[in-house]
Image: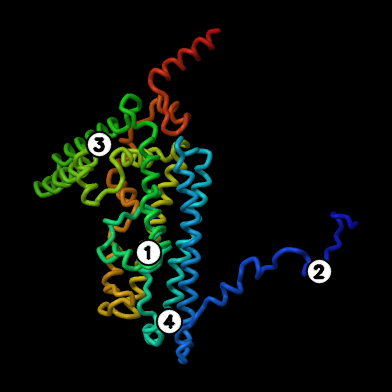
Amino acid sequence: MSCIYSNKSRDAQDGEQQVGEEGMIYGEYLMLDRVLSAQRMLSEQNGRAVHDEHLFIVTHQAYELWFKQIIFELDSVRALFNSSKGLDETLTLEILKRLHRIVLILKLLVDQVMILETMTPLDFMDFRNYLCPASGFQSLQFRLLENKLGMKQEQRVRFNQRYSAVFGDDPSAVDAITRSEEEPSLAQLVQRWLERTPGLEAEGFDFWGKYRQAVDQMLAQQHDAAMTADTDLRRKFLLNDVAQRREVFDSVFSPDTHELLLQRGERRFSYRALQGAIMITFYRDEPRFSQPHQLLTLLMDIDSLITKWRYNHVIMVQRMIGSAQLGTGGSSGYQYLRSTLSDRYKVFLDLFNLSTFLIPRDYIPPLTSHMKIALAGSWGQPLSEKQEDESSLERSVEASI
Protein backbone atom coordinates (compact mmCIF):
# COMPACT_ATOMS: atom_id res chain seq x y z
CA MET A 1 0.00 0.00 0.00
CA SER A 2 1.42 3.39 -1.00
CA CYS A 3 1.89 6.13 1.58
CA ILE A 4 -0.78 8.83 1.41
CA TYR A 5 1.89 11.45 2.08
CA SER A 6 4.00 10.34 -0.86
CA ASN A 7 4.77 12.91 -3.55
CA LYS A 8 4.16 10.28 -6.18
CA SER A 9 0.94 11.19 -8.01
CA ARG A 10 -1.34 8.73 -9.76
CA ASP A 11 -1.32 8.65 -13.52
CA ALA A 12 -4.35 10.35 -15.08
CA GLN A 13 -4.92 7.20 -17.13
CA ASP A 14 -5.10 4.89 -14.09
CA GLY A 15 -8.31 3.07 -13.22
CA GLU A 16 -10.62 0.56 -14.89
CA GLN A 17 -14.15 0.77 -16.22
CA GLN A 18 -16.61 -0.95 -13.84
CA VAL A 19 -18.60 -2.45 -16.69
CA GLY A 20 -19.19 -5.85 -15.16
CA GLU A 21 -20.59 -4.55 -11.86
CA GLU A 22 -24.22 -5.14 -10.93
CA GLY A 23 -26.61 -2.19 -11.13
CA MET A 24 -27.60 0.38 -13.72
CA ILE A 25 -25.27 2.44 -15.85
CA TYR A 26 -25.75 6.17 -16.49
CA GLY A 27 -28.14 5.93 -19.43
CA GLU A 28 -30.26 3.24 -17.77
CA TYR A 29 -30.56 5.17 -14.50
CA LEU A 30 -31.75 8.31 -16.31
CA MET A 31 -33.88 6.31 -18.79
CA LEU A 32 -32.26 8.28 -21.60
CA ASP A 33 -33.59 5.89 -24.22
CA ARG A 34 -37.07 7.25 -23.49
CA VAL A 35 -36.10 10.87 -22.81
CA LEU A 36 -33.96 11.31 -25.92
CA SER A 37 -36.44 9.58 -28.22
CA ALA A 38 -39.36 11.80 -27.14
CA GLN A 39 -38.68 14.55 -29.71
CA ARG A 40 -41.27 13.83 -32.38
CA MET A 41 -41.04 16.39 -35.19
CA LEU A 42 -44.40 16.62 -36.94
CA SER A 43 -42.84 18.53 -39.81
CA GLU A 44 -40.52 15.57 -40.42
CA GLN A 45 -43.42 13.12 -40.28
CA ASN A 46 -45.14 15.20 -42.92
CA GLY A 47 -42.15 14.92 -45.21
CA ARG A 48 -40.91 18.49 -44.80
CA ALA A 49 -38.59 18.65 -41.80
CA VAL A 50 -38.19 22.10 -40.24
CA HIS A 51 -34.90 22.48 -38.39
CA ASP A 52 -36.14 24.78 -35.60
CA GLU A 53 -39.03 22.54 -34.59
CA HIS A 54 -36.50 20.38 -32.75
CA LEU A 55 -35.39 23.39 -30.65
CA PHE A 56 -39.04 24.26 -29.94
CA ILE A 57 -39.78 20.75 -28.67
CA VAL A 58 -36.64 20.37 -26.54
CA THR A 59 -37.12 23.80 -24.93
CA HIS A 60 -40.71 23.07 -23.90
CA GLN A 61 -39.86 19.59 -22.67
CA ALA A 62 -37.12 21.15 -20.52
CA TYR A 63 -39.72 23.58 -19.14
CA GLU A 64 -41.98 20.71 -18.17
CA LEU A 65 -39.15 18.82 -16.44
CA TRP A 66 -38.29 21.90 -14.40
CA PHE A 67 -41.99 22.45 -13.61
CA LYS A 68 -42.01 18.92 -12.21
CA GLN A 69 -39.05 19.71 -9.95
CA ILE A 70 -40.65 22.98 -8.77
CA ILE A 71 -43.86 21.13 -7.89
CA PHE A 72 -41.81 18.49 -6.06
CA GLU A 73 -40.11 21.17 -3.94
CA LEU A 74 -43.35 23.11 -3.47
CA ASP A 75 -45.24 20.04 -2.23
CA SER A 76 -42.49 19.33 0.30
CA VAL A 77 -42.58 22.92 1.61
CA ARG A 78 -46.36 22.79 1.92
CA ALA A 79 -46.08 19.53 3.86
CA LEU A 80 -43.63 21.11 6.32
CA PHE A 81 -45.96 24.07 6.86
CA ASN A 82 -49.11 21.95 7.10
CA SER A 83 -48.54 20.51 10.56
CA SER A 84 -51.32 20.26 13.13
CA LYS A 85 -48.89 21.65 15.73
CA GLY A 86 -47.75 24.52 13.52
CA LEU A 87 -44.44 24.92 11.74
CA ASP A 88 -41.50 23.21 13.44
CA GLU A 89 -39.01 26.06 13.47
CA THR A 90 -36.04 23.71 13.30
CA LEU A 91 -37.17 23.11 9.70
CA THR A 92 -37.24 26.79 8.69
CA LEU A 93 -33.74 26.64 7.22
CA GLU A 94 -34.75 23.62 5.12
CA ILE A 95 -37.78 25.53 3.85
CA LEU A 96 -35.56 28.48 2.92
CA LYS A 97 -33.21 26.14 1.05
CA ARG A 98 -36.03 24.61 -0.98
CA LEU A 99 -37.67 27.95 -1.76
CA HIS A 100 -34.28 29.29 -2.84
CA ARG A 101 -33.93 26.28 -5.13
CA ILE A 102 -37.28 27.14 -6.72
CA VAL A 103 -36.07 30.72 -7.22
CA LEU A 104 -32.91 29.54 -8.99
CA ILE A 105 -34.91 27.21 -11.26
CA LEU A 106 -37.26 30.05 -12.19
CA LYS A 107 -34.27 32.27 -13.02
CA LEU A 108 -33.10 29.54 -15.37
CA LEU A 109 -36.55 29.36 -17.00
CA VAL A 110 -36.64 33.14 -17.49
CA ASP A 111 -33.30 33.03 -19.31
CA GLN A 112 -34.35 30.00 -21.34
CA VAL A 113 -36.75 32.18 -23.34
CA MET A 114 -33.72 33.81 -24.97
CA ILE A 115 -32.80 30.49 -26.57
CA LEU A 116 -36.20 30.31 -28.26
CA GLU A 117 -35.71 33.87 -29.48
CA THR A 118 -32.86 32.67 -31.70
CA MET A 119 -35.69 31.37 -33.90
CA THR A 120 -37.05 33.95 -36.36
CA PRO A 121 -40.77 34.53 -37.08
CA LEU A 122 -40.38 32.93 -40.52
CA ASP A 123 -38.68 29.90 -38.95
CA PHE A 124 -41.60 29.54 -36.54
CA MET A 125 -44.16 30.00 -39.30
CA ASP A 126 -42.67 27.01 -41.14
CA PHE A 127 -44.05 24.60 -38.52
CA ARG A 128 -46.60 26.59 -36.47
CA ASN A 129 -49.60 25.07 -38.25
CA TYR A 130 -48.56 21.63 -37.03
CA LEU A 131 -49.04 22.79 -33.42
CA CYS A 132 -52.82 23.38 -33.62
CA PRO A 133 -54.73 22.89 -31.37
CA ALA A 134 -51.83 22.53 -28.88
CA SER A 135 -51.04 25.52 -26.66
CA GLY A 136 -48.98 26.39 -23.60
CA PHE A 137 -52.32 27.08 -21.91
CA GLN A 138 -52.74 23.30 -21.85
CA SER A 139 -49.73 22.74 -19.58
CA LEU A 140 -51.18 20.74 -16.70
CA GLN A 141 -48.08 21.17 -14.55
CA PHE A 142 -48.04 24.95 -14.83
CA ARG A 143 -51.71 25.04 -13.81
CA LEU A 144 -50.92 22.83 -10.80
CA LEU A 145 -47.93 25.01 -9.91
CA GLU A 146 -50.12 28.13 -9.88
CA ASN A 147 -52.83 26.45 -7.79
CA LYS A 148 -50.36 25.06 -5.26
CA LEU A 149 -48.82 28.50 -4.84
CA GLY A 150 -52.26 30.00 -4.19
CA MET A 151 -53.67 31.30 -7.47
CA LYS A 152 -57.45 31.40 -7.10
CA GLN A 153 -59.86 30.65 -9.91
CA GLU A 154 -61.57 34.04 -9.66
CA GLN A 155 -58.25 35.85 -10.08
CA ARG A 156 -57.71 34.38 -13.54
CA VAL A 157 -58.92 36.05 -16.73
CA ARG A 158 -62.05 34.42 -18.10
CA PHE A 159 -60.34 32.38 -20.83
CA ASN A 160 -57.86 31.02 -18.28
CA GLN A 161 -60.69 29.67 -16.09
CA ARG A 162 -61.97 27.11 -18.61
CA TYR A 163 -59.62 24.27 -17.77
CA SER A 164 -62.43 21.68 -17.96
CA ALA A 165 -62.69 22.31 -21.70
CA VAL A 166 -58.97 21.58 -22.04
CA PHE A 167 -58.60 18.59 -19.72
CA GLY A 168 -62.17 17.25 -19.83
CA ASP A 169 -61.10 14.11 -21.70
CA ASP A 170 -58.41 13.34 -19.11
CA PRO A 171 -60.04 12.39 -15.77
CA SER A 172 -56.67 12.07 -14.02
CA ALA A 173 -55.75 15.63 -15.04
CA VAL A 174 -59.10 16.99 -13.85
CA ASP A 175 -58.69 15.12 -10.54
CA ALA A 176 -55.19 16.54 -10.08
CA ILE A 177 -56.43 20.09 -10.70
CA THR A 178 -59.38 19.60 -8.35
CA ARG A 179 -57.08 18.34 -5.58
CA SER A 180 -54.69 21.26 -6.10
CA GLU A 181 -57.61 23.66 -5.65
CA GLU A 182 -58.97 21.92 -2.54
CA GLU A 183 -55.68 21.31 -0.69
CA PRO A 184 -54.17 24.15 1.38
CA SER A 185 -52.04 26.27 -0.93
CA LEU A 186 -48.68 27.71 0.09
CA ALA A 187 -50.31 31.15 0.37
CA GLN A 188 -52.95 29.81 2.77
CA LEU A 189 -50.34 28.03 4.88
CA VAL A 190 -48.12 31.12 5.03
CA GLN A 191 -51.15 33.19 6.02
CA ARG A 192 -51.91 30.78 8.87
CA TRP A 193 -48.26 31.00 9.97
CA LEU A 194 -48.20 34.82 9.85
CA GLU A 195 -51.36 35.03 11.95
CA ARG A 196 -49.40 33.43 14.80
CA THR A 197 -46.60 36.04 14.76
CA PRO A 198 -45.56 36.68 18.37
CA GLY A 199 -46.16 40.25 19.50
CA LEU A 200 -49.53 40.83 17.85
CA GLU A 201 -51.47 40.06 21.04
CA ALA A 202 -53.20 43.15 22.43
CA GLU A 203 -52.56 41.97 26.00
CA GLY A 204 -48.85 41.52 25.32
CA PHE A 205 -46.52 43.69 23.24
CA ASP A 206 -49.49 44.96 21.20
CA PHE A 207 -47.43 45.80 18.12
CA TRP A 208 -50.46 46.98 16.17
CA GLY A 209 -51.46 49.50 18.84
CA LYS A 210 -47.90 50.82 19.15
CA TYR A 211 -47.52 50.96 15.37
CA ARG A 212 -50.71 53.02 15.04
CA GLN A 213 -49.50 55.47 17.69
CA ALA A 214 -46.18 55.81 15.84
CA VAL A 215 -47.98 56.52 12.56
CA ASP A 216 -50.19 59.16 14.21
CA GLN A 217 -47.12 60.81 15.72
CA MET A 218 -45.28 60.80 12.38
CA LEU A 219 -48.22 62.26 10.44
CA ALA A 220 -48.81 64.92 13.12
CA GLN A 221 -45.18 66.04 12.88
CA GLN A 222 -45.35 66.07 9.08
CA HIS A 223 -48.54 68.16 9.29
CA ASP A 224 -46.86 70.66 11.62
CA ALA A 225 -43.84 70.86 9.30
CA ALA A 226 -46.14 71.49 6.32
CA MET A 227 -47.79 74.39 8.11
CA THR A 228 -44.43 76.18 8.33
CA ALA A 229 -43.88 76.11 4.55
CA ASP A 230 -42.66 79.38 3.00
CA THR A 231 -45.40 79.72 0.38
CA ASP A 232 -49.10 78.91 0.19
CA LEU A 233 -48.51 76.71 -2.85
CA ARG A 234 -45.84 74.69 -1.04
CA ARG A 235 -48.00 74.45 2.09
CA LYS A 236 -50.98 73.22 0.08
CA PHE A 237 -48.86 70.58 -1.66
CA LEU A 238 -47.38 69.25 1.60
CA LEU A 239 -50.73 69.18 3.41
CA ASN A 240 -52.29 67.29 0.52
CA ASP A 241 -49.43 64.79 0.66
CA VAL A 242 -49.96 64.25 4.40
CA ALA A 243 -53.71 63.79 3.85
CA GLN A 244 -53.10 61.16 1.16
CA ARG A 245 -50.62 59.31 3.38
CA ARG A 246 -53.12 59.32 6.23
CA GLU A 247 -55.75 57.84 3.91
CA VAL A 248 -53.33 55.06 2.93
CA PHE A 249 -52.55 54.22 6.55
CA ASP A 250 -56.24 54.37 7.48
CA SER A 251 -56.85 51.61 4.93
CA VAL A 252 -54.53 49.26 6.83
CA PHE A 253 -55.86 50.18 10.28
CA SER A 254 -59.51 49.63 9.35
CA PRO A 255 -60.65 45.95 9.35
CA ASP A 256 -63.74 46.91 7.32
CA THR A 257 -61.66 48.60 4.63
CA HIS A 258 -59.31 45.62 4.56
CA GLU A 259 -62.26 43.26 4.08
CA LEU A 260 -63.55 45.41 1.21
CA LEU A 261 -60.12 45.33 -0.46
CA LEU A 262 -60.06 41.54 -0.04
CA GLN A 263 -63.39 41.25 -1.82
CA ARG A 264 -62.11 43.47 -4.64
CA GLY A 265 -58.98 41.33 -5.00
CA GLU A 266 -56.65 44.17 -4.06
CA ARG A 267 -55.41 42.31 -0.99
CA ARG A 268 -54.78 38.62 -0.38
CA PHE A 269 -53.85 37.99 3.27
CA SER A 270 -56.19 38.10 6.24
CA TYR A 271 -56.09 41.22 8.41
CA ARG A 272 -54.02 39.54 11.13
CA ALA A 273 -51.62 37.91 8.65
CA LEU A 274 -50.93 41.33 7.11
CA GLN A 275 -50.15 42.66 10.59
CA GLY A 276 -47.68 39.80 11.10
CA ALA A 277 -45.96 40.50 7.78
CA ILE A 278 -45.59 44.20 8.63
CA MET A 279 -44.17 43.38 12.06
CA ILE A 280 -41.61 40.93 10.62
CA THR A 281 -40.56 43.58 8.08
CA PHE A 282 -39.94 46.17 10.81
CA TYR A 283 -38.00 43.86 13.12
CA ARG A 284 -36.18 41.83 10.46
CA ASP A 285 -32.81 42.65 12.06
CA GLU A 286 -33.84 40.80 15.21
CA PRO A 287 -32.44 37.24 15.18
CA ARG A 288 -35.93 35.87 15.84
CA PHE A 289 -37.36 37.46 12.68
CA SER A 290 -34.37 37.04 10.38
CA GLN A 291 -35.41 33.75 8.77
CA PRO A 292 -39.12 34.68 8.56
CA HIS A 293 -38.10 37.84 6.69
CA GLN A 294 -35.94 35.80 4.31
CA LEU A 295 -38.91 33.51 3.72
CA LEU A 296 -41.19 36.42 2.79
CA THR A 297 -38.50 37.77 0.46
CA LEU A 298 -38.20 34.42 -1.32
CA LEU A 299 -41.98 34.31 -1.82
CA MET A 300 -41.78 37.70 -3.53
CA ASP A 301 -38.86 36.46 -5.63
CA ILE A 302 -40.96 33.52 -6.82
CA ASP A 303 -43.86 35.82 -7.75
CA SER A 304 -41.50 38.28 -9.47
CA LEU A 305 -39.76 35.61 -11.53
CA ILE A 306 -43.02 34.04 -12.68
CA THR A 307 -44.14 37.52 -13.78
CA LYS A 308 -40.81 38.06 -15.58
CA TRP A 309 -41.20 34.68 -17.28
CA ARG A 310 -44.70 35.63 -18.40
CA TYR A 311 -43.41 38.98 -19.66
CA ASN A 312 -40.56 37.42 -21.64
CA HIS A 313 -43.04 34.96 -23.09
CA VAL A 314 -45.41 37.78 -24.09
CA ILE A 315 -42.62 39.72 -25.84
CA MET A 316 -41.45 36.59 -27.65
CA VAL A 317 -45.00 35.79 -28.83
CA GLN A 318 -45.43 39.35 -30.12
CA ARG A 319 -42.16 39.03 -32.04
CA MET A 320 -43.19 35.68 -33.50
CA ILE A 321 -46.87 36.19 -34.43
CA GLY A 322 -47.58 39.89 -33.79
CA SER A 323 -50.44 41.19 -31.66
CA ALA A 324 -53.45 40.37 -33.86
CA GLN A 325 -53.20 36.63 -34.59
CA LEU A 326 -55.06 34.06 -32.50
CA GLY A 327 -53.14 31.55 -30.41
CA THR A 328 -52.89 27.94 -31.59
CA GLY A 329 -55.09 26.86 -28.67
CA GLY A 330 -57.90 29.30 -29.49
CA SER A 331 -56.94 32.20 -27.22
CA SER A 332 -56.48 35.78 -28.42
CA GLY A 333 -52.75 35.09 -28.47
CA TYR A 334 -50.66 38.10 -27.51
CA GLN A 335 -53.64 39.97 -26.00
CA TYR A 336 -54.51 37.05 -23.71
CA LEU A 337 -50.92 36.58 -22.57
CA ARG A 338 -50.51 40.30 -21.89
CA SER A 339 -53.53 40.20 -19.57
CA THR A 340 -51.71 37.70 -17.31
CA LEU A 341 -49.11 40.34 -16.39
CA SER A 342 -51.49 42.26 -14.12
CA ASP A 343 -51.41 42.21 -10.31
CA ARG A 344 -54.32 39.78 -10.28
CA TYR A 345 -51.80 37.02 -11.08
CA LYS A 346 -49.51 37.90 -8.15
CA VAL A 347 -50.20 35.38 -5.39
CA PHE A 348 -48.22 37.28 -2.73
CA LEU A 349 -49.39 40.75 -3.75
CA ASP A 350 -49.57 41.98 -0.14
CA LEU A 351 -45.86 41.36 0.36
CA PHE A 352 -45.03 43.65 -2.57
CA ASN A 353 -47.19 46.38 -1.05
CA LEU A 354 -45.69 46.21 2.45
CA SER A 355 -43.38 49.13 1.64
CA THR A 356 -46.52 51.31 1.40
CA PHE A 357 -46.89 51.02 5.18
CA LEU A 358 -43.28 51.46 6.25
CA ILE A 359 -42.27 54.24 8.62
CA PRO A 360 -38.76 55.62 9.31
CA ARG A 361 -36.64 53.60 11.74
CA ASP A 362 -36.79 56.36 14.35
CA TYR A 363 -40.56 55.84 14.64
CA ILE A 364 -40.52 52.03 14.88
CA PRO A 365 -41.71 51.03 18.39
CA PRO A 366 -38.77 49.61 20.40
CA LEU A 367 -39.09 46.07 21.68
CA THR A 368 -39.88 45.78 25.38
CA SER A 369 -38.07 43.38 27.69
CA HIS A 370 -41.25 41.28 27.66
CA MET A 371 -41.11 41.06 23.87
CA LYS A 372 -37.45 40.09 23.87
CA ILE A 373 -38.29 37.24 26.25
CA ALA A 374 -41.26 36.25 24.08
CA LEU A 375 -39.09 36.09 20.99
CA ALA A 376 -36.92 33.53 22.73
CA GLY A 377 -39.90 31.14 22.89
CA SER A 378 -41.60 29.14 20.18
CA TRP A 379 -43.43 30.80 17.29
CA GLY A 380 -46.96 31.87 18.13
CA GLN A 381 -46.57 31.19 21.87
CA PRO A 382 -45.10 34.32 23.50
CA LEU A 383 -45.03 34.64 27.25
CA SER A 384 -47.90 36.54 28.80
CA GLU A 385 -47.25 39.54 31.03
CA LYS A 386 -48.20 37.41 34.05
CA GLN A 387 -45.77 34.68 33.03
CA GLU A 388 -43.01 37.25 32.65
CA ASP A 389 -43.70 38.69 36.11
CA GLU A 390 -43.66 35.19 37.63
CA SER A 391 -40.41 34.34 35.82
CA SER A 392 -38.83 37.60 37.00
CA LEU A 393 -39.93 36.86 40.59
CA GLU A 394 -38.46 33.36 40.42
CA ARG A 395 -35.15 34.74 39.15
CA SER A 396 -35.08 37.34 41.94
CA VAL A 397 -35.73 34.69 44.60
CA GLU A 398 -33.02 32.43 43.15
CA ALA A 399 -30.57 35.34 43.09
CA SER A 400 -31.28 36.24 46.73
CA ILE A 401 -30.78 32.62 47.80
- Which element is circle 2 on? loop
Question: Image point 27% across, 48% down: which residue?
Answer: 267
> Which residue has dot 3 on it?
215
Q: Is residue 195 above or below residue 98?
A: above
Secondary structure at badge 4 equals loop
Q: Distance between the residues labelled 2 and 4?
A: 44 Å
Spot occupied by residue 155 in the image (x, y as percentages of width and height): 27, 57
Q: Nearer the viewer, residue 232 or 351?
A: 351
Q: How crowded is mark 1: few (under 14 residues within 10 Å), some or many (20 or more)?
A: some
Foreground: 31 or 229? 31
Q: Would you say the residues marked 2 and 4 are in contact, meaning their CB atoms lie under 8 Å apart?
A: no
| Left or right of 350 in this view: 261 | left
Q: Which amino acid does label 4 sit on?
A: Met
Name the quadrant containing residue 272. top left
Residue picked out by circle 2: 16
Q: Position of residue 116 (x, y in %)?
A: 44, 76
Task: Give amino acid for label 1.
Answer: Lys
Q: What SS does tag 3 mark?
A: helix
Q: Which residue is drawn at 37% across and 31% down?
A: 199
